[in-house]
Amino acid sequence: MIDTNIRPATAADVPAVKAVTDAAYRHYLARIGLTPAPMLADHGENVAAGWVFVVGEPVHGVLVLVPEPDHLFLDSIAVHPDMAGTGVGRQLLGFVDAHARRLGLPEIRLYTNALMWENQKIYPRYGYELVERRLDEGIYDRFHYRKSIGPVDS
């Protein structure tokens, strides 16, 4: 049975966060010709900041959600390849919407590498609209998306 309890990550989860993130993004190394940003992240720092959420025991899904003043930034979503097609990604994306609402933020933003074409099909199905394509940090060719989650009750 799949564990559906998404919870904040703890320091003890950091090795699993790294392992799931690396497993989820590793196949992009050859395609994009550089290391995907989520694989370079300081997972311990992100967990300590309260930005990381995990699902599964053992962990098989990871979210990195950074609250900004006017939006929630979906910095990374990673599902272990062994869990592909099980609905974990859909569950995590639903959590992102709910988390933004809990924080009182009306919009979610994210980006994906232009060569991660699978994501360009997925995100619009979940209500994300393409905002722009731009070169970030001088090396990352990215598509930037946003999703309005509607007015937030005050």
Image: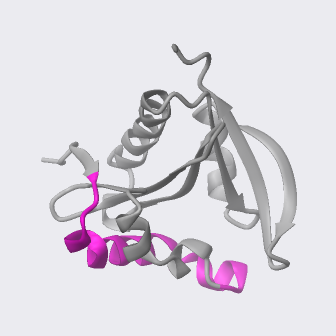
- The x, y position of residue 13, in whole percent, is 24, 70
> Is residue 12 shown in magenta?
yes
Q: Residue at x 42, y 48 (%)?
A: 89
> Is residue 148 shown in magenta?
no
Using residue 24 as the reference point, say whether residue 7 is left or right of it.
left
- Quadrant housing residue 60: bottom left
Q: Nearer the viewer, residue 73 or 91?
A: 73
Count of numbered circles in the view: 0
Q: Nearer the viewer, residue 134 or 154?
A: 154
Q: Nearer the viewer, residue 147 or 66?
A: 66
Q: Residue at x 68, y 59 (%)?
A: 112
- Quadrant housing residue 35: bottom right
Query: Mostly what secondary structure, the magenta segment?
Result: helix
Can residue 3 be seen here?
yes
Q: Is residue 152 above or below residue 126?
A: above
- The x, y position of residue 135, in whole percent, is 86, 68
Can residue 80 be seen here?
no
Q: Residue at x 51, y 73 (%)?
A: 25
Q: Is residue 51 above or below residue 11?
A: above
Using residue 13 as the reference point, say whether residue 17 is left or right of it.
right
- The x, y position of residue 122, in whole percent, is 60, 45
Q: Is residue 23 above or below residue 102?
A: below
- The x, y position of residue 149, in whole percent, is 59, 25
Q: Which residues are magenta?
A: 8-34
